[in-house]
Image (cartoon, rainbow, N blue to C red):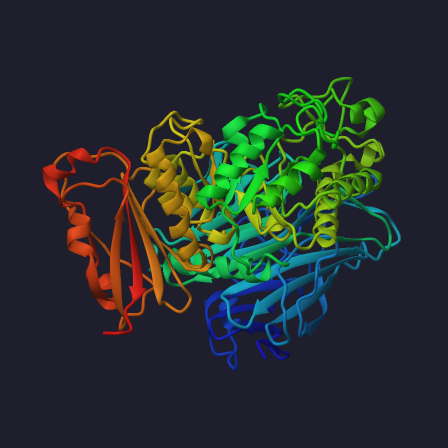
Amino acid sequence: MPIFWNEEQKEFHLTNGIVSYIMALLPDSSPGFIYFGRALDPSRSYAYLQYLEGRGASTQPEGMPAEYCLDFTCREYPSAFRGDFRTAAIGARAKDGKPLALDLCYRDHRILDTKPEIPGQPSCYTESNGEAETLLIQLKDEYSGLEVDLYYTIYSAAPVLCRHTCIRNRGPDTLVLERAMSSVLDLDDDEWDFIQFSGSWARERHEYRSRLRPGSQAVSSSRGMSSHQHNPAVLLARPDATETAGEVYAAVLIYSGNFEIGADVGSHGHCRLYSGINPESFSWELKSGAEFYTPESVTAYSSQGFEQISLTFHRLFRERLARGYWRDRERPVLLNNWEATYFDFDEAKLLAIASESKALGVELFVLDDGWFGKRNDDTSSLGDWFVNTKKLPDGIDGLARKIEALGLRFGLWIEPEMVNPDSRLFEQHPDWAVGPLGNKRTLARNQYVLDLSRQEIVDYLFKTISSLLGSAPVSYVKWDMNRNLTEPVSACLPPERQGEFFHRYILGFYELYRRLTEAFPKILFESCASGGGRFDGATLAFAPQAWTSDNTDAVERLAIQWGSSYMYPLSSTGAHVSDVPNHQVGRITPLWTRAFVAYFGAFGYELDPLKLSIEDREAIKRQIVFYKKWRAVFQFGNFYRLKGGLQDNEYAWMTVSADKQKAVVLRVQILSRPNSRSSRLRLRGLDADQDYQVQVLPSVQLKDDASIRLNSGSRTGAELMHAGLICGGDGWASAGRGDFASWLFTLEADNES
Ligand code: DGJ
């Protein structure tokens, strides 16, 4: 049993033999944090670690010993207004605005042999008994009648803890929640680096690392979506932590809306890592008897660097967050027409592209934006989900059947959450758009957002989109979302409850996604928000893959895929080969480098195959044959980052099959450097005793390539991991290679020798 309760010490110990999470009740009966780290013996007590120390100029709850300073102790769910001046987990007021100094005391606890779902919100799950146990700690503030249930799930085989909270009003009066965090982790010291995944459109999830300093440092979104700007994930790592060594904590929020994850370093050098809904744009009315559930936060621990954190999240998200028919299935090689045609297409053009794609080996043809209403650019028709018969005279059904007759599956782009002012839908329902504040709404990409906090709009969209998807053989849907939310006002909420809008929008978004994915269980959904603006765990629970970024340049993608890989598995990472000069940055990269980078994900093309040279056409055929052969390793293998980072001239990473029989390694050299020295690339995750046949594919063929000459042949796993591959080292011979050269190394277990 992984959850223990020591009645005498009032101590909880959750452990699975990999990690231990230990708490004990503080003198006022509120739960205090003791330890989260490598597993400790659960038969012993660690309550002594929760020592009390008097501090000058500090606060104590009435009737408590002078040593019990609220601002100094490590707590599990600290409330606002009570003398713990660090970031609070919960803050509430009476309806008349009076602050409530919640005194949340332990009442009871239960140990569940399952992982409960969070009503209306996606979360990690279990598939069989014994996979996880959950501790439910029940707290109550006697004065207001507010109850707080803290849920902690520990999986039997992963160093993670899944947490969420249910807040219930058992008092007679209506209360207003102003903050309701999902998790708090009060670490004992502040010797940590803060690692965030930030950027903007077309440069999402770049990794930034900085030293913690006193005060609060946080990433957040107030855009109505998890955002391009900051991913809902933060790592705290020891300053010397590397991929394979050093302590790392992670807090990843399973939420698609406004969030905040921060580290608050208090005056005594403790560090509070917290995560939850962004309190800035949030309030929630809790009538007597009502309850509120926070999103799930997944907290992970590694004593062996970032690699363990990533492997843990990849497995958990791939196998126990993503769900449905496509979860474990190999994803098709697709061709999307967006960068091939943009809005300028008709049926003949699409069929010509599709037919050529088929000849190249593509399996799924995806029709992107521009097939509906009178849409020929981005100024009109969102909301009018009926086909433009001028472009597609036989409708979506007719086109889809013709595509299927070519031997391809058919996929379709939609953007259900949006409406253009120039659309029939807006003409009929101008009040369905979010806002306005005053008399104006803000436009972005010429569009407004439909108010998904309203049930009738969610119902309407379900009906409209499900009849569209039911009308044709659609095998794949790209669900796009191309603007941030502004003027957060819902016509159906009274003025004093408008603070509920953002979260209600997200609940409506989840409901729509859930109903559509349940109604069409075999359709492969790929999420998208102007690229990777909503690449988060919650959306992943519905759509097992996401369009990682609108930036398809191979070099730009290195930093984007590198950052994404800390949390999100390769099977969730949509990655396509596009044309050159690249449409986002104008860069010209070798066709094979573009493929090598895109291979590490759900692979496809985003170009016009009719415009290819004969040479490129043949190369793409070979690329697809190669990907299909190695697809399972690329999509479901264990992923290791080897070299890279924003300032580096070189990136390298690899993926290894679960049975360690196959692996693929990528090395990209960004700029060509004269006379540069060779280096070693030490591999990871292999079977040390296994012999592997190493083959090398270069992005550019040279007469004599040292990487091929020196690395091809039989090597043991130990050799490859401890001595490594030899990279570079061909002196002036590399001049013909130029910038953005890359090499793909394949490793196959050599069981004959
Ligand atoms: C933004 C997406 O990220 C693109 O891939 C494309 O689908 C466009 N929207 C279409 O408008």
Which residue, as the protein is rendered here, is positioned at the far bottom?
43
**How far from the left and from the top, in percent, is residue 13?**
56, 73
The quadrant in which the C terminus is found is bottom left
Residue 73 visible within the image: no
Q: Is residue 86 above or below residue 446?
A: below
Q: Is residue 589 above or below residue 403?
A: above
**How far from the left and from the top, in percent, is residue 154?**
58, 68
Q: In the visual, does 649 lie left or right of 267?
A: left
Label tally: 0
Which residue, as the protein is rendered here, is positioned at the far right?
172
**How far from the left and from the top, in percent, is residue 125?**
63, 63
Q: In the visual, does 200 lie left or right of 345?
A: left
Q: In the visual, does 191 lie left or right of 156?
A: left
The quadrant in which the N terminus is found is bottom right
Q: Nearer the viewer, residue 744 or 156?
A: 744
Q: Is residue 277 above or below residue 419?
A: below
Q: Nearer the viewer, residue 652 or 69?
A: 652
Point 89% across, 53% down: residue: 172
Which residue, as the protein is rendered here, is positioned at the far top?
439
Point 25% across, 56% down: residue: 695
Point 32% across, 53% down: residue: 665
Q: Quadrant of residue 5?
A: bottom right
Residue 584 visible within the image: yes
Q: Is residue 718 above or below residue 707?
A: below
